[in-house]
Image: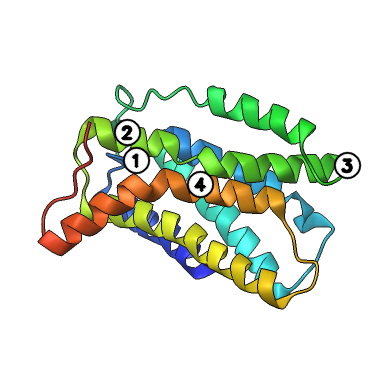
Amino acid sequence: GDMLHLLSFVVLLLKIQATRSCRGISLKTQEMYTLVFVCRYLDIFWNFISLYNTVMKLVFLGTSFWILYLMRYDKIVKVTYDREQDTFRHHFLVIPCSVLAILIHNAWTPFEIIWTFSIYLEAVAILPQLVLLQRTQNIDNLTGNYVFLLGSYRGMYILNWIYRYFTETHYKQWIAWISGLVQTILYIDFFYYYLKSWKNNEKLALPA
């Protein structure tokens, strides 16, 4: 799951760097993913789990901020951004997730609430990207692969959760489970058309 997640960002950076274009990529989604990682990985300053864990946190933070920099400030890349199409009001996702994290969490501590917020927000952060792809109908292979990998990583986590539920005593993570399920459901329509286009060797297009 972690490798699919990492690979999705590698593919996205490859697309932007190789083509010098971010056409078809939602800045709103990238901003929310950056917020997700900042909130989730705040504990990098005081909670050392393993070298692998720390390196992965730094990589996700670094790639997220680099993508934002390219889309916002790179002189060539920023002019390819579909600003007129990427109009999803993402504050309608951020605010409810913030309220939900305050109301439903595992412990009443600042970091736990912030961590829970990141879980809720990640579940819906892909929505602006999916809406943009539906609007533009211009989905290149790298963009399609990026979204597919991003969705597949959560599917792998669900399989891991099922395995751990049956092999570990008292293993329950209801907030992560339900949020992960919601996140995966949002991808189902995209998965269907992605696999259909791959099977028929056609250009990927989502119904408007």
- Is the residue under label 1 in contact with that under label 2 (CB below 8 Å)? yes
* Kind of residue at badge 1: Ile
CA gap between label 2 and label 1 equals: 8 Å
Find residue 48 and report its image quarter: bottom right
* Kind of residue at badge 2: Leu
Drawn side of residue 70 relative to residue 194, left or right: right
* Kind of residue at badge 3: Thr
CA gap between label 2 and label 4 equals: 17 Å
Circle 1 residue: 25
Q: Is residue 129 above or below residue 64?
A: above
Circle 4 residue: 183
Drawn side of residue 56 relative to residue 191, left or right: right
* Kind of residue at badge 4: Gln
Drawn side of residue 200 relative to residue 13, left or right: left
Find residue 99 and report its image quarter: top right
Residue at image position (84%, 58%) is: 46
Label 4, secondary structure: give it: helix
Q: Nearer the viewer, mark 2 or mark 1?
A: 2
- Is the residue under label 3 in contact with that under label 1 (CB below 8 Å)? no
